[in-house]
Structures are given as C-alpha cells and as structure tokens.
Image: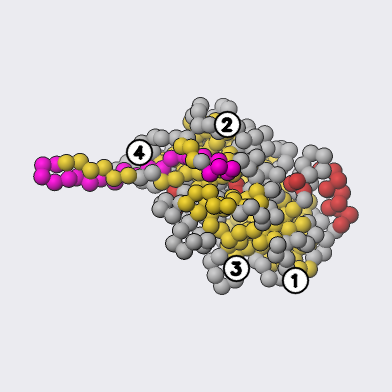
Amino acid sequence: MVTSNKISHTFIVSTLAGILLLTSACAPAKAEKLIFTSHSIGTNDTYVYSMNLDGNNLVKLAKCSLFYAQPFEMWSADGQKLAFIDPETEPGKTWLCVVDANRNNRRQLLEITDSIMSNFAFSMAPDGKKIVMSRDVSHIIETPEGGSVHVEVTHDSDIFKVDVASGLVKQLTDTPDVWEQHPSFSPDGKKIAFITRIDTEDEKNNPKYVYVMDANGSNRRLVGYHAKGMPFPLFQGFHWSPDSKKIAYSVFNMSTSDYENFTDIFIIDVDKGGLTNLSNSPYVVDTNPAWSPDGSKIAYFSGSLDEGSFTWIMDADGRNKTKLYQTGGPSSWTPDAKGLIFTNRLNVYEIMEMNTHGENRRSLVKIEDLKISEPAWIGQ
C-alpha cells in the first residue's frame, strides 16, 4: 500500500460523518472512499488512486490508459475491483487487467497488444464478474484474379465479454462490415449499450447508431439514431441513469452553421427509444453528464473559451437549468444527492465539495504532489 507523506486536508468531520450515517443503510460501500486519476508532472503517465474521505490511506492502484474507458466504467459498483489497460507490465505487450481495491490479486486477463487500440473500449459489470469490450476483428480477404491475387482489408470491430474469474472470452456480436464500439453495462448489469458505424464511400468514421442488448448478447435493439453528419460523442462513454432506464451522453451539435465542436447533452429512453436534446445550447460545450443518485437530476460541465466552464444542474427532463460554481473539471455527486465534489479550479491538487445550489464550498482533501482529475465517490 502506498501512502502520501504530503497530504494535508481540511475535512468537515461532522458534516461528512452525517452523510455517511444517512447513506450507510442503502449504499455503504459507495460512501467509504474517493477515487480519482492523476497525471504525472512532466510525463503522459496516468494513475488511478483511491483514498479515505479524510485523505488518509492513499493507494496508487494502477498505471493505465484512460483513452479506452472512463473512470466510472473501470470500477465494480461496490468499489472493490478495478479493471484497467496495463501498458507496461511486459515490454511490447498490452494487457486488460484487474486488481482489488486494496491492490491485491492483480491479474492479467487478456493480451490486447495486436488490437487496433483506437477501437478498443471496455466497461466492468456492476458485480465485478464480467468485463465487456469492443475489439478489432478486421481481416484480410484474398481473391484469385487471373494469375494474381486481389487483397482487400475488411475493417470491423465486435463486442466481446470477458469472465473475470476464468479469463474466458465470449463474442456477443458478429456483424460483418459494421463497427460496434464503446460498450457500457447498465447499473443493474442486465443490459449493454453500444454504438455502431457503417463506413461508405461518402461517409467514414461516423458512429451514429445507438443499440442496447441483453448482457448475454440477445435482444439487440436500435434505440437512437443520429442524422448524417452528426458524429458520436467525445469518447466520454454512456452515462446510465441509476434505474437503468435512460442513457445520457454528449454529442456534437451540428445545428449551427458555424460548427466549431460545440456539444449538447442528449438522453435516450431505453424502453421507448428516441433521442432528446436536454441542454440544447448551440454555442457552448456541454459534457460529462452525471446522474444524481436518485435519478431526478443531471449535473454537467458546460462552458466556452470566452466565458469559462461551470458546473450546471438540470432536472432529468432538461428543465430548471442552474449554473453553479466555476469548477476545475466535471463534478460528481455525493451519495446523499445533496452535494457535488470537484477539483479546485485554482488548485488542481485539491478536491472540494459544494451543495447543489453552488454554496458552502469547502475543501475536502489536498494532496500536494498529485494533480487530481475526475474525483468521485466509488460507484458514482
């Protein structure tokens, strides 16, 4: 276990002790630890950490690549197991790995060195027993033509499931010439959402179909479709509602004639299908939607170069949008849904908390030698 000798904190014991007491009956594991990522100064290395709410028991769990999964998709729901892409255990090889939250039982599950990594993405099941992933399955077709052979590369990626205990791999989709990418488990573990793209002569690299299927690969259904020219989001992953009935995510807004990478928050009703633009703000960047634990509200990060970026909160139907504090990054909900935690905009070594009105801002933890990003309670 790794602990920091430079941790200092101003921790409001009575307030957070009350939060833990109120939430212990329904979600004790979620309220026990904070998780965050940190980029090493002067390098591109990224590490995943966990620690107690008071800043003690800091544990460096793994060096990993976050390009292939968002932090919330790397953890089991109880916060006891972490999945990650390990780029350094063996020189020249890359592995999908798991490790317990106490840094024990670190295991290599699947070598993915030869995968086309831009298409590799994964999500851990809430119970920590399965990992669903997209993997490149492109292949070469050789066709005899007269005295020569015509060689053609067929590009494709499919969805696979890995059993954490055994390492056995099961292919869930097999759709030739269709890229199936960015799978994500629902909170109840019963469904998997993913996106697809079909490259044509006129349009390439434009994932625009959103599908949901059962966790065993059956009952595949199209639930959302983006019109031509509207690319899929910024690789931020799907954000499922706590009841597994809706999905929120960020999508490029193509409604502006002077399109400059503006994004909006969209939502899908998994049972009924169809898309709804919740934030609908053409000239700003809306990203990182986060559901409140009771599913009634969504916090998101929004802003522009001219005005800065702020945390906003809106009702789950897009109503009652409220701008809060100018934060240093996306916010995460506290387990009781009464507050949000975030990185201090002026001090990236500090995690702060505020209530849902943007008031009572206070420091939770300062870690003087680690640049903190995307802090969250485990399981959020």
Q: Is residue 263 or residue 173 the one in the foreground?
A: 173
Q: Amino acid at mark 3?
A: Ser
- Residues at badges 1 and 4 in contact (C-beta under 8 Å)? no
How far apart in space, not on screen, are marks 1 and 4 (Cα)? Answer: 53 Å
Residue 173: % across, % down:
44, 35
The numbered mark, 1 or 4, whose residue comes first in the sequence reads 1
- The quadrant holding residue 37 is bottom right
- Which disc is residue 270 wearing? 2
Residues shaded magenta? 145-167
First in sequence: mark 1 vs mark 2: 1
Q: Residues within 10 Å of mark 4 (few under 14, many from 20)?
A: some
Amino acid type, label 2: Val
Residue 274's place in the image compared with 11, above or below, is above
Label placed on residue 5 = 1
Any part of residue 375 in sight: no
Dot 3 falls on a residue whose secondary structure is loop
Residue position marked by numbered label 3 in the rendering: 40
